[in-house]
Image (cartoon, grey):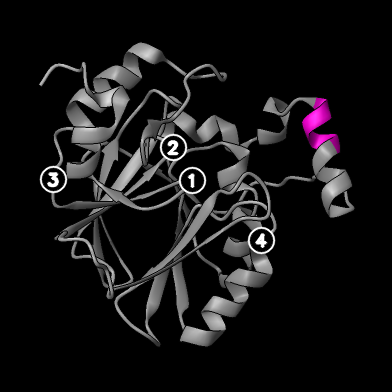
Amino acid sequence: MQVIGFPSAAFGTNCYVVATGPGQECVIVDPGIEILDQLAQVLREHRFKPAAVLLTHGHLDHTYSVTPVCGAHGVAAYLHGDDRYRLRDPLAEFAPQMLAMLEQQFGKAATWTEPDDVVDLADAATLDLAGLRLDVVHAPGHTQGSVMFELAGVPEGTREAATRTLFSGDVLFEGSIGRTDLPGGDHGAMLRTLAHQVLGRTDDTLVLPGHGAATTIGRERVTNPFLQDLPR
């Protein structure tokens, strides 16, 4: 399995391109702000053909480029139904000063249109896309419709002693967790997610988060301060 990850131009949001190998179909996870040129380079270099866009949740820093990516390749966006409303106008959740900052940084005003084809995800669904079999794990707390995507195997070249890969979005980070003080956040739901959906994964699971460096469930179980007092 090949996974090429790179950060977006704003907020350091990780975008991932996942495929079984060069020249194959791929899925794109969380295409954020100003990633189109870098994504095009990755697709061209590895001769990937997009089959779908997967969204871990509906926040703008993870979804900003979903419509142009889906439109350019004629593919659907996959998002949990509880976050579906966020795709209608994600700019509405951004403070005016934040939108002004983006405009100043990138030299243009933020605009938004929904993708033409959006597939609602549900907990425990299995997606067979681009030769990959991905399990959908509903993980509310950061948003109502936050999900993680889990699949067997790890990216080639992985140095960790891992057998599975988890795209954790903004649920779990190296040494931290997603914030719950934004609209739609729920601290109680996040605690339940961490106790059951995160700590319920095996230690040999490689975690590729929405921001920051890769880690493993085993490492976070021992070192992440937000996981230490949860029921086991």
Tell me the distance, in whole angstroms, between the alpha carbons under discs 3 and 1.
20 Å
| Most common secondary structure along the magenta stretch | helix
Residue drawn at (64%, 35%) of the image? 88
- Which x, y percent locates residue 99? 80, 36
Which one is earlier in the sequence, the residue at label 3 or at label 1? 3
Of badges 2 and 4, nearer the viewer stands 2
Residue span colored magenta: 96-100
Residue located farthest toward the top when viewing the structure as drawn: 188
* Mark 1 lies on residue: 211
**Circles 2, 3 touching at the beta carbon (< 8 Å):** no
Rendered image: mark on residue 170: 2
Rendered image: mark on residue 68: 4
* Mark 3 lies on residue: 203
User: Front-most of 85 and 165?
Assistant: 165
Of badges 1 and 2, nearer the viewer stands 1
User: Front-most of 187 and 134?
Assistant: 187
Which one is earlier in the sequence, the residue at label 1 or at label 2? 2
**Circles 3, 1 touching at the beta carbon (< 8 Å):** no
> Does dot 1 land on a helix, a strand or a loop?
loop
Which one is earlier in the sequence, the residue at label 4 or at label 3? 4
**Circles 1, 4 touching at the beta carbon (< 8 Å):** no
**Circles 1, 2 touching at the beta carbon (< 8 Å):** yes
